[in-house]
Amino acid sequence: MTKPFAAPPILPAASLDKANTLVEALPFMRRYAGATFVIKYGGNAMGDDSLTESFARDVVLLKQVGINPVVVHGGGPQIGAMLERLNIKSEFVDGLRITDRNTVDIVEMVLSGNINKSIVSAIQAVGGKAVGVSGKDGALISARKLQRTKRDPDSNIERILDLGFVGEPASVNPEILEAFEDSDFIPVIAPIGVGPRGESYNINADTAAGAIAAALNATRFFLLTDVAGVLDKDKVLIHELPLARARELMTDGTISGGMIPKIETCISAVDQGVEGAVIMDGRVPHAVLLEVFTEGGVGTLIRA
Ligand SMILES: Nc1ncnc2c1ncn2[C@@H]1O[C@H](COP(=O)(O)OP(=O)(O)O)[C@@H](O)[C@H]1O
Ligand SMILES: CC(=O)N[C@@H](CCC(=O)OP(=O)(O)O)C(=O)O
């Protein structure tokens, strides 16, 4: 006798959603297997322990599915807090911290010490393996002093600004990072550069991350910030931004303030061969996973 047909059990909607999410992720896992992703993790996204934990889980998952994540971190607010504790005044020009000899010591201590090791610990606490390096290790980031000029609005004379030990990457030697590619270790990089005489330079973390993404020919460069992505004139998120359009939006003033150096960094990374740069909200839990493994993503994708 044939068995009566048994109706399949009805899955609760939440379980079905989970299954669909996993199925949706599969083609992305295939597409990105073996790819390098450089992720800039900013100081503003670090304040909250649960956010740091969700970021660490995302990075570990990427590594687990065969992607090669490289983390470059900032720490502006944390440097500011330490300087304040030590009663050292700090000023910014065009978003860059004026960094005298005293300040560069503190910047290096906070970035390569406290912050770097707390991200390494966060990754290890969720089961990953991480190793912290600064741009000085393995001569990863050779830096030169950043030259800045500013036009005086009254006299219209261009003046040279001395930002002290603020540097820009002169060259990136990715050898030390290549050593981690075939290992289980996730590199976590502090944006400190080394000058010709072994001196330390304070490099804006977006800039350092962009230079590393370019040197590694990364498939994706993620910039985690505190807005959903690039917004248009009506404050609506732009999902895809070709390079030419990005330049137009800077010229017509739609992109301003802190977003300008980010876009410039993304344009330069894409110009140098990075397949796509994504600006997205690091305050959204699991922002990286949602961007990588879901259709449409969550931020603004900038590409050629
Ligand atoms: N078109 C734009 N789209 C999104 N953000 C913009 C735009 N133009 C200017 N911004 C500003 O840029 C800021 C991001 O830069 P910034 O504050 O320097 O970020 P972070 O601290 O993460 O480095 C946003 O919070 C926003 O105020
Ligand atoms: C030259 C310069 O300004 N360097 C930055 C480096 C840290 C950084 O960029 O951190 P966020 O990404 O968190 O802003 C600074 O001293 O604050």
Image (cartoon, helix red, strand yellow):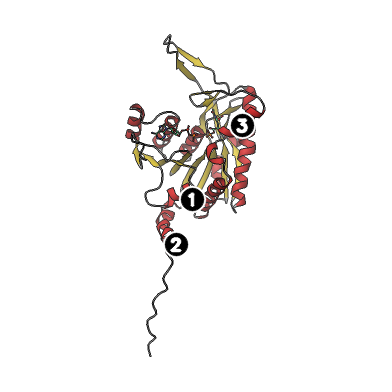
Which amino acid, by three-letter code, is at mark 2?
A: Ala
Which amino acid, by three-letter code, is at mark 3?
A: Ala
Q: Is residue 180 above or below residue 173?
A: below
Q: Secondary structure at mark 3?
A: helix
Q: Secondary structure at mark 2?
A: helix
Is residue 174 among the parts visible in the rendering? Answer: no
Counting the numbered discs, the total is 3
Q: Earlier in the sequence, mark 3 or mark 1?
A: 1
Q: Secondary structure at mark 1?
A: loop
> Which mark lies nearer to you, 1 or 2?
2
Badge number at residue 283: none
Mark 2 Cα shell of 10 Å, populated few (<14), some (14-19), many (≥20): few
Q: Is residue 162 above or below residue 237?
A: above
Q: Residue at x 44, y 62 (%)?
A: 14
Badge number at residue 67: 1
The percent position of residue 41, horizontal first and vertical second, equals 52, 40
> Which mark lies nearer to you, 3 or 1?
3
Judge by depth and name the residue closer to the eye, 7 or 60: 7
For the C terminus, the image quarter is top left
Image region (quadrant) for ligand 2 = top right
Is residue 209 among the parts visible in the rendering? Answer: yes
- Dots 3 and 2: beta carbons under 8 Å? no
Which residue occupies the extreme right position in the image? 86
The percent position of residue 161, horizontal first and vertical second, equals 51, 17
The percent position of residue 45, horizontal first and vertical second, equals 53, 40
For the N terminus, the image quarter is bottom left
* Disc 3: which residue: 81
Whether disc 2's CB lies below 8 Å from ligand 1 is answered no
* Disc 2: which residue: 14
Which amino acid, by three-letter code, is at mark 1?
A: Ile
Which residue occupies the extreme top position in the image? 155
